Image (cartoon, rainbow, N blue to C red):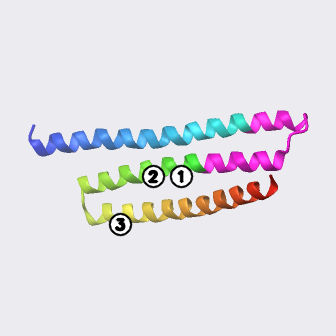
């Protein structure tokens, strides 16, 4: 094997690991949000404030999703440098634009939830 092939295989393994970390973060956030949701639904019958607590859960889930997306974008960028064809660069650009749009909208929603939670306390 030549050095280029070894480097490409090594980078592929690394980017797969980075993608898996991103997916793991999103899955973990989903689990945390699900457990939190179940807890507040049970607590709802005990006098808990569902609206405020569910807003915190949404903000928490959104934070995990944003962090996971950052890892996945990093892996996509590294992958594109491995095989820099015009098609790969265009594909990366579309993926990044979509993920940045999602990140922006989730970020705004998280800020709105945090501000609303701060006002209601």
Which residue occupies the foreground of this view, 35 or 111?
111
The secondary structure type at the circle numbered 2 is helix
- Circles 3 and 1: CB atoms closer than 8 Å: no
Residue 109: give x, y in percent of width and height.
66, 60
Give the quarter of the image for residue 50. top right
Q: Assess whether mark 1 and mark 2 are in contact (beta carbons under 8 angstroms).
A: yes
Q: Which mark is residue 66?
A: 1
The part of the chain drawn in magenta is 37-62
Residue on which disc 2 sits: 70
Q: Mark 3 — residue?
A: 90
At numbered mark 1, what does the secondary structure look like: helix, strand or loop? helix
Question: Comparing marks 3 and 2, which lies closer to the viewer?
Answer: 2
Residue at figure coordinates x 90%, y 34% from the top left: 46
Q: Mark 2, residues whose alpha carbon is within 10 Å: few (<14), some, or many (≥20)? A: some
Left or right of 70? Residue 85 is: left
Q: Tag 3's secondary structure?
A: helix
Q: Quadrant of residue 27?
A: top right
x, y percent for residue 16: 36, 41
């Amino acid at each position: 094997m030549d050095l280029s092939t070894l480097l490409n295989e090594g980078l592929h393994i690394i980017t797969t690991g980075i993608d898996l970390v991103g997916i793991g973060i999103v899955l973990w956030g989903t689990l945390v949000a699900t457990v939190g949701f179940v807890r507040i639904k049970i607590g709802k019958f005990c006098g808990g404030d569902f609206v405020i607590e569910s807003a915190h859960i949404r903000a928490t889930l959104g934070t995990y999703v944003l962090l996971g997306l950052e890892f996945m974008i990093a892996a996509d960028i590294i992958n594109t440098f491995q095989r820099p064809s015009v098609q790969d660069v265009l594909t990366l650009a579309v993926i990044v634009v979509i993920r940045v749009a999602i990140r922006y909208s989730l970020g705004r929603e998280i800020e709105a939830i945090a501000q609303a939670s701060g006002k209601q306390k």
